Image (cartoon, rainbow, N blue to C red):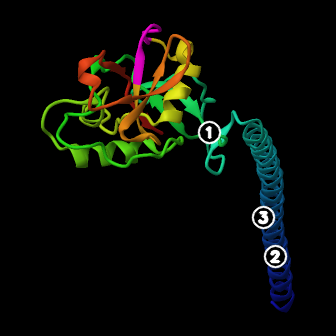
Amino acid sequence: MTELSNLRNEAGAINQHCTMDSETIRQYRISVKREISRKKFLSYFVIAFFAVSAALIACDKNNGNNNNGNTNGNGNGNGSTGGGDTLTEQLKIGQSYQGGIIAYIDATGKHGFIAAPEDQSAGIEWTNMQCPAPNVSDESIGSGKNNTIAIVEKLGTRGNYAAKLCNNLVLNGYIDWFLPSKDELNELFINRHLIGGFDYNSMYWSSSVSWRGFNYAFYQDFSNGESGAADTWKSYNGPAFRVRAIRYF
């Protein structure tokens, strides 16, 4: 009986040993699978990291090229406006723009004035004869709008006259037209062929009065470019002059 018991104990120990070996193998397999999964994850992570890095480098390079393009465009005057974020075409005299034709561009290349595409009158007086002309002696570029406002405020709404005609003009969606000053009118003459629509055998009114007196307003002969000063109180007895409105941009 004792021998039989010993044999049973030995058999149990052998079975337990075998069971432990199987459990060890199972745990080992699990650990191997975990290690493989961890290495696969690391591999995928490394691949993804380098892919994202390459994409970021490419984006930075493209942005750098775009910035260089904007800078070059600004330097040449035909790139962008403002801070260089919005690209625009280069403005040029004779170009259709904001309700009319570009007639003058200042040194910035971004501002100037636009002429209406055609004359507003084939012959109109400078004044409505209600009172002497106002003191609008500024002849410079940039003064035409203020001159026109002053003339209309002085002469009022009665009748029709050059400054009022331009001041009341609504054309191509714009309402801020005015009679050009003497120097602005000269720019119209200089660029008359690019602007178009002028009568080259006629005189055109300006909004500037002459040093000869407040009743004399400057005009320009578009047949030869000569400027003169006509007595506005007597203009109704002679030929009425043509008018071309402009607006600033």
Q: Of all residues shown, which one is farthest toward the left?
A: 158
Give the residue type that dot 2 points to.
Answer: Met
Please name the residue that numbered disc 3 is placed on. Answer: 34
Please name the residue that numbered disc 1 is placed on. Answer: 106
Q: Secondary structure at mark 1?
A: loop
Please name the residue that numbered disc 2 is placed on. Answer: 20
> For the point 38% across and 35% down, which residue is it?
216
Marking on residue 142: none
The picture places residue 214, in percent across and down from the top left corner, at 36, 43
Give the residue type that dot 3 points to.
Answer: Arg
Q: Nearest the camera: 131 or 222?
A: 131
Q: Secondary structure at mark 2?
A: helix
Q: Nearest the camera: 50 or 246?
A: 246
Q: Residues within 10 Å of mark 3 (few under 14, many from 20)?
A: few
Do callouts 3 and 1 mark residues in contact (Cβ within 8 Å)? no
Image vertical order of residue 220 relative to residue 21, above or below: above
Q: Nearest the camera: 6 or 188?
A: 188
Q: Residues within 10 Å of mark 1 (few under 14, many from 20)?
A: few
| Residues in magenta, as a range | 197-204
Residue 94 in sight from this viewpoint: no
The picture places residue 203, in percent across and down from the top left corner, at 42, 17
Q: Earlier in the sequence, mark 2 or mark 3?
A: 2
Horizontally, residue 147 falls left or right of residue 50, namely: left
Task: Give the Cα distance between marks 2 and 3.
Answer: 21 Å
Give the residue type that dot 1 points to.
Answer: Asp
Image vertical order of residue 247 relative to residue 29, above or below: above
Q: Quadrant of the N terminus?
A: bottom right
> For the point 24% across and 48% down, which residue is it?
154
Q: Secondary structure at mark 3?
A: helix
